[in-house]
Amino acid sequence: MGTTLLSAPHEEQKAGQIDIALEEMRHDTVQVARFLISDLEQKNVKVDTLLPGLSAYTYVAETDTIPYKVFIASTGNPGHAIKLVLFPGDRVSITGSVLDYQVKGSGFNDRLRAVQYACRPYEEKMDSLFSIMTEEIYNKEYLPAWRQRDSVQADYIRRHPDDDLSLFLLGEIKGKWIDGLYPLLTGKVKNGPFASIAQFIDKGLQRKKKFEDSRQRIKEGVEAPGFTLRDIGGRNLALSSLRGKYVVLDFWGSWCGWCIKGFPDMKNCYDKYKGKLEILGIDCNDTEEKWRAAVAQYGLPWLHVRDDGQSDVRLQYAVQGYPTKVVVDPDGRIARIFLGEDPAFYQYLDELFN
């Protein structure tokens, strides 16, 4: 029993803890949402809902090995949230209000707070435009404010390449900033508490390089890259097994509105040239359940396989948008490539077979 009493406080002490005493808690519902930094797709977000009337609340992390990203928001200030990172062993206190909070016990979160405050004017500008958004407002006002907000964070990264916060911020803004800013960060930062973010960025950069290599190779007249994927019946289907006839590789997804819009014309085309032409639908970025449901719902009669990312056929073919249709000739060479639901695709087939 003595050992148990000694070990329990030790474990409790290692877990990160946030003591929250915000003004909103007295009269608003407050939510504390969190997920592990390593949960990059935010698949396991946990939320504590605090009903009005509390003067203080303490959140203790469920694990003492990985940092958490934490958001604290209230119903009285929609669109605003306190963003924190809770490290193992930290004890952080948050006081004040959601709009004007103070943080103690964490130098990291104090620096993060300063960056958040510097970004706030641009975020408030973006928030104010949501209800009146048009394409013109998006291009002339919303997008510039977005870029200015990200520029604030990018400037911090440039000035602090040896700060863990810089990698955290880069994981927030991503996009075009990665190429220029990621090489600036030190090895210590990349191998530190946000190593999972660095690994994600590294993987993305490797994929980008492979995409560029593929984009240079994928041209009309070259041999179509071979692949084997599982068909909708669970059997392996190799592209090489379709040699001897024209094949349309249709890269699509159930989430793609233009793909769905084009199905009636695709079905007419398939009926018209069946025997001369085979269509191989390659589903991308779907779960297996959504893929199967879409094939059934839209009654798609041609061959179907799913690119689950393991073979990454879309990367081999440098697919830049959806739908993409690649016409492969009977000898296995790329005849034409069409990006988007393009009438020129159907005109090309009419000319080819008539």
Image (cartoon, rainbow, N blue to C red):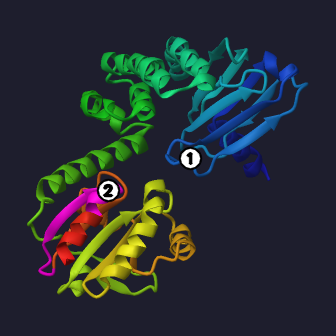
Q: Quadrant of the C terminus?
A: bottom left
> What is the three-letter code of the residue carrying label 1?
Gln
Look at the picture and state if 172 lies above or below 157. Answer: below
Where is residue 194 shown, x and y percent of the image?
43, 38
Q: Residue furthest front?
A: 354
Q: Is residue 199 above or below residue 154?
A: below
The one nearer the camera, 331 or 121, is 331
Position above or below: 264 against 258: below
Which numbered marker is on residue 141?
A: none
Q: Nearer the viewer, mark 2 or mark 1?
A: 2
Identify residue type, mark 2: Asp
Per the image, the residue denoted by label 1 is 42
Left or right, 325 with respect to 214, comes to right
Residue at 35% over, 64% down: 251
Q: Residue at x 69, y 20 (%)?
A: 94
Q: Is residue 285 visible?
A: no
List x then y, in percent, for residue 318: 24, 56
In the picture as drawn, the residue positioned furthest to the left comes out as 221
Q: Residues within 10 Å of mark 1 (few under 14, many from 20)?
A: few
332 over 147 or under it: above or below: below
Q: Earlier in the sequence, mark 2 or mark 1?
A: 1
The residue carrying pointer 2 sits among few (fewer than 14), some (14 to 19) or many (20 or more) residues within 10 Å by Cα, namely some
Q: Was residue 334 drawn as part of the magenta stretch in this picture? A: yes
Point 54% across, 39% down: residue: 67
Q: Which residue is mark 2?
A: 342
Span shown in magenta: 330-345
- Among the 4 quarters of the image, the one containing residue 248: bottom left
Residue 328 visible in rendering = yes
Q: Using the image as rendered, state which of residue 203 and residue 56 is in the foreground.
A: 203
> Which is nearer the eye, 176 or 132?
132
Q: Residue sitting at 46 percent across and 86 percent down?
A: 233
